[in-house]
Structures are given as structure tokens and as C-alpha cells.
Image (cartoon, grey):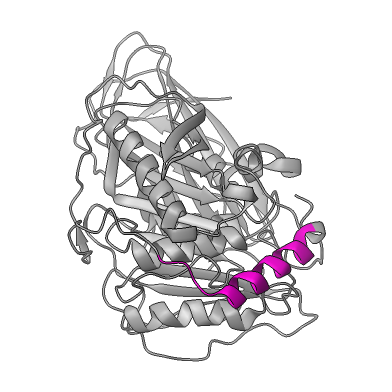
Amino acid sequence: MRQKSIFAAVAAAALLVLATGQAALSDSLGTAKSSSATAVAAATAGCGKTPTLRSGSQTITTSGKNRSWILRIPDNYDNTRPYRLIIAYHWLNGTAQIVDSGGSDGAVWAYYGLKQVSNNSTIFIAPQGINNGWGNSNGEDLTFTDDMLKLVESNLCVDTTQRFALGWSYGGSMSFAVACARPTVFRAVAVYSGAQLSGCNGGTQPVAYMGIHGTHDSVLNISQGRALRDRFVSNNGCTPQSPREPAQGSLTHIITAYSGCRAGYPVVWAAFDGDHTPSPNDGSTSTSGARTWTTAEVWKFFTQFQSGPSQSPSASPSQSPSQSPSQSPSQSPSQSPSQSPSQSPSSGPGACRVTATVNAWNNGLTENLAITNTGSSTVNGWSLVFTLPGGQTITSGWNATYSPTSGQVTAKNMSYNGTLAPGATTEVGFQATHTGNAGKPTSFTLNGSPCTVA
């Protein structure tokens, strides 16, 4: 991503914006109802429609200008299912194309790594900033965001309680701006190495907030990131504190989940021993989207939120140094998407095949499971049983519910993927910590019948 080469440009832009003052921001979505700890899934107008939008580059006229953006729709898109939606803003002199492709790190880093771990559970948007930045003059970038959302939600089925934004550097500053100005639109934001560069219209209502910042950031000093965080510590009713941060030279990160926050509105602060980057690696001064801990931590932060009653975070902060994404502000594994199983497993044997793919780092991993019905009868409701290797503990999952979180685990279908026709495949997955053994389960059963392991 040529991060170092753009540090000076980011710094110059930061000084310019701070010197000229903040832009006035519009609030065309300001009529939405107030956020609350209990979110009821609301289907958009696109639910049930055959969409006219397709994955790929898009254009839209907004604020009198032609703006470009990239849309990624899940491969197995179902127009009856409300999807999570994530907007990922690029950095100064970055582009929507790099966010979408992952740049030099490839697909593993697309949308800051979240697209791969989402496993087709999420709609993604990568907007393109004017002059490759997010100056937000007269609120035009907020209006651009509003107009993209309106178009997408009129075409696609989106869960309006599950909208999120994130970005690095100038993109983090834009994510902070939408948290300030669109608190009833976005459920949570993640700000990587940000500062108040894109404005903060409003900024008085709670939004679930995660900040990530290097302790010796040479472009946007960590004090600027702390200031953004502290606004939402106050807005969210959290107990003020000075979170512990790693010492220079330790090459670690420390994650703190604030205590006392209003239910459903956590604040999490992740400080790392490093410079201006969205992809730090513990134990190294290098950066890599394939090995960074930030992807799993941000995904875990976003997917803790459920439609229906929210899952409130742990009441006490988690401050111990981490070599990998092992801490979480939530007390129990989050299931994403959030629908609960609606079908009981059918009786009788059924042939199956499971393909397991593990992506491991330090003491964490993600595992994708592709479940194929190789029998001749349709499966209506399924339970997949497997045993995790010793030392592995599930911390979050998607496309299934998981219980318990270690040992012999049962994964059960969600309401939208319980039917498997002959030859059909559904994909599920989970994130877990491990103590050295990042291996796969060696056997699986589907509704009591042994599966072939591919």
C-alpha cells in the first residue's frame, strides 16, 4: 500500500485541514429514529426485489458531482435476507480500487481484511474520495455516503441496524465524521489512526466506537486518536480512564474495553507499538494485511451486535498485552449474521462432505467450513458436530450458531441456510484462539451421519 510514502502527504493534509477549520456538514438522514441498545431488524425497500445493481464499479451524481464507488454483493446473495453493510473509506492518496482489491496484500486485505472473513455475509462499499481524500467540503462526502446508501438499500436487502464504517488515516477521519453526523444510521465505526480532519457535525450522540492507533505515529499523533476516542467515551457514558498502552520496543498491542458504557454502546481502544499503519504485526516492525491482528479484532467488534436485543459488552476493561486478536469486548461468541435457527434437523441419515480451510496467526485463527449435501434427499435443518483440537476456543462465528465454544462443538443452521438440496453447499465459519495447535477438526457428522472430510 506504500504506506510510508504517503505519510508526508497525510501530514500536510492534516495541517491544512486543521488550519482552515472544519467543514459544515449536512444531515440528510437526520430524520432517522434514535439509536438504542435494542435494535430491531428493519428490512429495506430492496428486500424481495431482483436487484439492478451488480458487484463492481458504480457512479452516482451527488452534490452536483459525478462520484465513483465500488460495490461488492455476496456471491450467494438472497434478496429475502437482510444483510450487514460495511463502508470502507480509503486513506489520503489511496483509492477505492486499492481498498477493493487489497492492494499489494491481495484479497486477504480487501476492505481492510473484512471481506474475506465475512464469508459472503456482508455487502461492502468502497467510496472514492475527491482528490483521493475526504475533505468533506460543505458536507459533500457525507451526502455522497447518504446517496450511496439510499441507492443500495432501494436495490438490495440491508439490515438497517447493521450498518458500519471504517477507514485508515484520512479514511479513519471520515469514519469519525459519520459517527458524529450519522449516529442513528451507523451502528458502529472503527477508526484506524484517525484525527478530526473531515469534520464532526453533531458529535453528541452515542455510537459504538473502536479506535486503533500507533503509540509513535509520526503522521497523526496518537493524542489526536485519543481525542476522537474520548468524545465517544463521553457520549456513550463510559467511565473515563487512561488505558494502558504498550512500551516502545515491545512490538505488541494492548486492547482496552471501557467499563460503564451505556448498554449496546461499547468503546474499545487498541494501541500498538508502531507507526502510521492499519496493518501492524506483533513481534515485527513490518506491516502485512495477511498477518495483522486488526482484521480479526474489528470483525469481532462489528459482529458482536445483534438484531433484536443488543449484546452489551463486558463491564470491566480488558487491558492485558496481546500477541493476537484474543480480547473481545463481548462476553460470549457473537453469531453473525444474527438470525437464529428456525428449522429442526430432519431425521435419518444423509451423506455429506466438509471442506475446512484454516487461516492462522500467532495464537488466533479463522476457519471456514464448506458443507455439501452429497446425498439424494434434501436436508431440512442441520446440525454439524465436530471436535476442536485441544487449546482452541471459538470467540465468534458466522452463518451458524456454535455451542459450546471448545471441545465437541455443535454448529446449527441459521434461518436462511437450513435447507440443503442434493449437491448444494453452504459455507459457515468461526474465529478462535489457540495455544499452539491451529489444526482442523479431523471428523464431522451432519445430523448424526459421518461426513467425508475433503
Q: Main secondary structure of the magenta part?
A: helix
x 67%, y 69%: residue: 323
Residue 153 higher or lower than 139, as above or below: above
Residue 379 is a magenta residue = no
- Can you give x and y, in whole percent of width and height, for residue 207 in the image? 34, 68
Extent of the magenta region: 6-24
Q: Relative to residue 21, is residue 80 drawn left or right?
A: left
Residue 267 higher or lower than 153, as above or below: below
- Can you give x and y, in whole percent of width and height, for residue 2 in the image? 79, 52
The answer to whether residue 319 of the structure is visible from this angle is: no
Please name whichever residue, 123 or 300, is drawn nearer the observer in this view of the structure: 123
What residue occupies the far top of the structure in this picture? 376
Q: Relative to residue 301, is residue 100 drawn left or right?
A: right
Total labels: the figure holds 0
x 27%, y 33%: residue: 154
Please name whichever residue, 325 or 387, is drawn nearer the observer in this view of the structure: 325
Residue 20 is a magenta residue = yes
- Can you give x and y, in whole percent of width and height, for residue 21 in the image? 53, 75
Please name whichever residue, 210 or 91, is drawn nearer the observer in this view of the structure: 91
x 33%, y 79%: residue: 235
- Can you say which quadrant of the picture contains the C terminus? top right
When asked about the image quadrant of residue 182, the answer is bottom left
When asked about the image quadrant of residue 375, the answer is top left
x 72%, y 85%: residue: 247
